Image (tube, coloured by chain):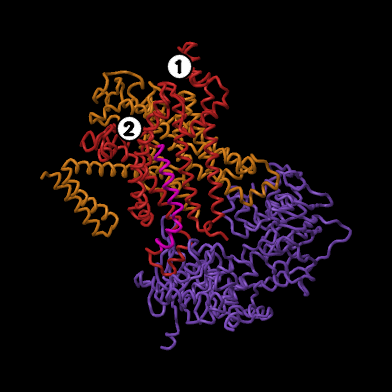
Chain colours: A purple, B red, C orange
Amino acid sequence: MKQDQDVLLQIEDLRIEGYSDEKWIEIVHGVDLTLKRGQVMGLIGESGAGKSTIGLAAMGFARDGCRISGGSIEFDGMELTTTSESDRRALRGSRIAYVAQSAAASFNPAHKLIDQHTEAPVHYRIRKRMESQEDAMQLYERLRLPNPQEIGFRYPHQVSGGQLQRAMTAMAMACRPDLIIFDEPTTALDVTTQIEVLAAIRDIVDQFNTAAIYITHDLAVVAQMSDVIKVLLKGNEVEEADTETMLKSPKEDYTKSLWAVRSFQRDEKKRPENTQPIMSVQNVDAAYGPVKVLQDVSFDVYPGMTVAVVGESGSGKSTTARCITGLLPPTSGKIVANGMELPPSYKQRTKDQLRQAQMIYQMADTALNPKVRICDIIGRPAAFYGGLKGTKLKSRVDELLDLIELEPSKYYHRYPPELSGGQKQRIGIARALAAEPSFIICDEVTSALDQLVAEGILKLLDRLQRELNLAYMFITHDLATVRSIADEVVVMKEGRVVEQGPKGEMFTPPHHPYTDLLLSSVPEMDPNWLTTVLEERGVDNIGEAANV
Amino acid sequence: MSGVLSIVLKRLGLGLLTLLIISILIFGAVEMLPGDMAEAVLGQGATAENLAALRAQMGLDQPAPIRYLDWLSGAVVGDFGISAVSGASVAETIGPRFRNTLFLAAYAAVIAVPVAIILGVVVALLRDTLFDRVANVATLTSISSPEFFLGYILILYLSVKTGMFPAIAKLNDGMTFFELLDRTFLPALTMVLVVVAHMMRMTRASIINLLASPYIEMARLKGTPAWKVIVKHALPNAWAPIINVIALNLAYLITGVVLVEVVFVYPGIGQLLVDAVTKRDFPVVQACCLIFAATFILLNLAADVGAILTNPRLRHPK
Amino acid sequence: MSYFIVGYYALLIGASCLAAFYQKRGVFLILFSLTLISFIVGIVGGESSLWFITLCAAALALAAGTSFAFREFLVIVLPTELSKAVKTAPLTAAFGLFVIMTYAIAGVFAPIIAPFGEAEVISSAFAPADENMILGADQLGRDLFSRLVYGARNTVGLALTATICAFLLGAVGGMLAATIGGWFDQFMGRLVDVIMSVPSLIFALLLLSIFGTNVAILVIIIAVIYAPRVFRLTRAVAGNVVVMDYIEAARLRGEGTFYLIRREILPNSTAPLIAEFGLEFCFVFLLVAGLSFLGLGIQPPTADWGSMVRENATLISFGEITPLFPAAAIALLTVAVNFVVDWMLYRSSGLKS
C-alpha cells in the first residue's frame, strides 16, 4: 500500500464538455493522469489540446461554460467529482494552488500584493496575518524579488510582469500546498525574463518538495521543469513518459513531429560583389510621439540574401520594418532602395516603389481578410500592379497557388477561415509574390506555427528565394530559425543595433554581452540546459543563495 | 494624489468647455431663425411698431456676439432675460418649476437606484437561469414602451379603475410632504419603471463583465468563499461601472421627465419647455435647454470623476 | 366559489405536479410560484383578477405558439444558411420577427387593409365599436382601426427614413474617421461628444422650435441627433478592423480609402452594424412617437400613433382603453425589434468566443 500513499493525484477517464452553439460538446475525451508527491508533470500540446481545462479539473474546477461530465479525480484519497463544492473549495489555495498565465490580469488591481498573498493562509487559519506577511517576505526573498520587505506593499500595476509572475508563485506557496498548477506562467514574458522566472519556480518547487503540473506549449521549457511529460492533442492523450525518455525516444508520430529538431539548414551565402544593396537602412531614428524607439539603426540587405533581425519585444525590430515600409516615417536617416532614396511615408511612394517591398505577417489570421476569397486576396495585387484581368488574372492566380504548393482548383474559391494555419501562411506568401517584389519582410512568420509546418514554410521561402532571387528581412526571436535560413544577423536591443555580421561569425564567440545573454537565454531541449546556464552565469541555486 | 488631481481637473475643464460650446450652440441655433426672434414670436400679422418694440425689449438691435455675452453672463447668475410671450422674468417662471422637476426626479431616483442595483446584481449572479431570462424579457419590454404608454396604463389601472392614486399631479401650496408624495406617486412610478429596467440591464452587464476577469477566477481558485469573492474582490472594482450606471440614469431621469410631466400635467420644467416650444417663446426655450444640458453634462462629469477617483491604478500611481 | 376558480387552481396544481414528476424544474418553479401568487392576488382582487391572470397566460401562450409556428415556417422557407441561424433563435426573437413582418405588411398594404381612409370622418366623435369599426371612432369620428393601419405606414415610415439617414451619416463618418485617422478622427470625435452631451429629446425640441415642424425637417433633425451614436459604434467597430494586418497590407499596396472601406472594412463590420441599426431604430421610433405625442411630430390629419394617443387621451379618464391601442402599437414594435436585436447581439458575442 506504500505505493498508493505515494500517489497524490489520480485522474481516470476524465471527460469535460464545453457549451457552444446551444449544446454540450466533449472537449476532453477520457484522459488519465497519475501524479506522485513531489513530482512535476509537464502537460504539453497546441492550443485547443485541453491542457488548461485538465489543469483546472485537477482542482475540481471547471470554467463557466464547461463541465466535468465523466471520470474520476482523486486527490490524496478524496474523490473531487463527488464531494461537495464547499469541500472542494477548502482544498483550493490550501492544498492545491494555481499560477495563472497572465499575472498582471490575475492579481486584483484594488489590493496590495501582500494582502492578496495573506488572504488564503488567514482564511484557512494556517497563519495569523502578521506571520503570513513575514512568510510572504521570506518567499519573495527566496524567489529573488528585489526589495522583498517592501515589494509586497505595492499594487499589481506598480510591479513588472516578470516580478508579478514570481509574486504569484509566492502566493501559490503561501499555504505550502501539495500541488501547484502552473498554467503557462512564462508565455507572456521575454526570454531573458523567462529564464529568471523558470529558475525561481523550479527551485522553490524543489525546496518544498511540491508536486506540480506545468502547462505549456514550449517543449524546451517543459524539458527544464518536469520529471514526466504528457503530450496532449485535441483533448486526447498522445503519450506519456519521463522527460529523458520522452526527449530521446518518443513513440508516437505526433510527438516525433513536435520533437523534430530543425533539420533544415542552409549554408550561409556571401554578399554578391559589385552590386548595391536592394534595401539599405541608413542611420534611422524613429519615435512614437515623444518616445524615441529607434536610434541610429543601419544595415543593408543584398539581392538574394536573408538578413535576420533578432531581439526581444520592445527591441525595435518590428518598428524598423514599419520604417522601411513607410508606415512610420523616420525622424532622421534614410531608407534607400536600389540606390534610390525612398520617400519617408508610404503615402508619398510610387506604386512601383510600394510593389518592390512586400510584407508577410506573423499572424496569418489577421493578415488575411476573412471575408475575401483566396482568389481575390491573391488576385488583387496582380490586378492592382500588373493590371491583369479576366482569364489572364485567373491563370496568374493559379500559377501563384502552384508556386506555394496549394492545388488551385481546390483553394481558388475558398475563404481564409476554412484553411489551416500553415495554408493561410502560404496564402500570405502568395499575396506578397503576386506583386512580383524583389524584397520581402518576413515578420515572425513561423512563430505561430507548429514545428513541422514552420519547417515547410521555411523550405518554401528558401526555394522561392533561389528561384526568384528574392531578398528577405527576417524578423524573429527564434534562434533556430536564424540558424536555418539567415545569411546575416542583426541583433537589436532597446532601439539600437547591438551587433551585426554574417551568420557564422555571430554564432561563434566572442559575442557582445547582450548577444551572449540573448543567445544563452533561449531555452534548449537539453533537460540540463537551465542548470548549465545558471552555473555559467555564476548562480547555481537560487534557494541556496537565499538561505545564505 | 497629484496625478489624480490633474486628471480630474482636466476632466472638469473639458466639461466646462463642452458646456460653453453647448451654450454657443443653443444661442446660435436661435440666430439661425429666418428673420429674427421678434418676427418669429409675433408672426405674420405683426405691425412694424410692435416688432420694433419687441426688438428693443429683447435687445435685438445689438450684434449677435454682444447679445451672446450678455445672455451668457446673465445665465451664469441665473438671469435668463424676459419671456417673449408673457413678458415675465424667465428665471422666476423657471425657478419653482425646476424645483418641482428635481423633486420628481429625486423621488423616482430614491426608489429606482437601490432597487435597480440590487436587482441587477441578483440577475447577474443568476445569469442564464430562468429568472434571468424572464427579467431580460421584462426589462426589454419596459425599455421599449414609450413613457406615455406606461403612464396611461398606470392612470387607467391605478387611478381610474381602482382610485388608489390621483391621476393628475396638480400641486398646491401648503400640501404636506406626505400629500406631495401621494400626488406625485404615479409619475414617479412611471419613471421608476423605465429607469429600473435600464439600470438593471446596465448593472447586470457590468457585473458579468467584472466576474469574467481573471482576478475573480484567481480568487475563486484560492478557495475564497463566494460572498467574499463578491465583497472583497468584485466590489472594489465595481464602483466605477456602478457610479457610471447611476449617473447616466439620473441624467436620463432629468430629461425623460418631459413626457411624463405632460402625461400627468405636472408643473415642471419639461412641460414648460414643451409649451414654450409650441408658443415659440425663445428665451424660455433657450433657458430650459441650457438647464437640461447643464444637468446632463454635470452628471456625466460626476460619473467620470467618480470613475477616476475609484480607479486603483490612478489612485496609486507608479 | 365558482367553477372557474376550482378549475383554475386544479389546472395549475395538476400541471405543477406533472412538471415536478417529469423533473422539469424550471416549468415547475414557474407554475408553482404562479399558484402561490394566484392565492394572494385572488384573495385581494377577487375572481376578476384571476381572470386577468388567465387572459395574460393565454395571451402569452398564444404569442409563444405563434412564434413557434412562425419559426418553423421560416426554417422551411428560408435558404439553408439563414434557416440554420433561425433554427436556434429563441422564441422571443421569432416573435419579434413575426411582429416586424406583420407591421411591414400593414404599412405597405395600408390602403387595402384599412376599411376607411385615414382622414375620412364616418361617424360621431368617440363612437363606440360596432360591426363597421372594430375599435370605434376617434375624437373627430374617424375609424380608429384604419388610422392605426395607416399609422404603421406614416409613423414607422418616418422613423425608418430618419434612421436610415442617421445611419448613413454616422456609418460613413465613422468608417472615414477610422480609416483616415489623424486630425479628422479627432475632430469628428470631439464634434460627436458635443452633440451627444445634449439630451436628444431636448435637442430635438430646441431645433423644432426654430425650424418648425414638417416631415423633411423632422427627418433631418433626427438624423443629425442620432448620427453621433452610430458614428461612435462604427468608429469602434471599424477601429477594431483597421488595426488588422490585412488593412496594413492593403494600405502598403497603395489602395485608396474608398477601396479599404468597401472591400476590407465593411464586410467585417456588418453584423454589429445591423444590430446597431435595430437599436437605433428603436431610439428614433420612440423619439418620433414622443415628439408626436407632444404635438411636434407629424401634423394632423395624417394618422400617427403618437398624436393619436394625445388626441384620445381624455377617454382614459372614462376608463376606456382605446387611446392605449396606438401606444401599445408603438411599444409592441419596439419590443419586437429589441427582441431581434437582443438575439443578434447574443449570437455575435457568442460567435466571438
Image quarter where the N terminus of chain A lies is bottom left
Q: Magenta part of the protein: which range? A: B229-255
Query: At numbered mark 2, what does the secondary structure look like: helix, strand or loop?
Result: loop
- Please provide percent x and percent y for residue B288: 44, 31
In the drawing, what numbered circle is on residue A205?
none
- Please provide percent x and percent y for residue A29: 46, 68
Q: Check residue B234 for magenta coloring.
A: yes
Q: Nearer the viewer, residue C261 or A12?
A: C261
Q: Residues within 10 Å of mark 2 (few under 14, many from 20)?
A: many
Image quarter where the C terminus of chain A lies is bottom right
Query: At numbered mark 1, what does the secondary structure look like: helix, strand or loop?
Result: helix
Cα distance between the residues tagged 1 and 2: 28 Å
Secondary structure that dominates the magenta span: helix
- Please provide percent x and percent y for residue C352: 50, 53
Chain designation of label 1: B
Residue sitting farthest toward the front: B77
Q: Nearer the viewer, residue A121 or A382?
A: A121
Chain designation of label 2: B
- In screen coordinates, is C77 left or right of B264? right
Please determine whether, in this image, residue C83 is positioned above or below residue A466: above
Q: Which residue is mark 2?
A: B266
Residue sitting farthest toward the right: A274
**Residue A542's image quarter?**
bottom right
Type of amino acid at the residue the image marks with label 2: Tyr
Q: Check residue C68 for magenta coloring.
A: no
Q: Which residue is mark 1?
A: B42
Type of amino acid at the residue the image marks with label 1: Leu
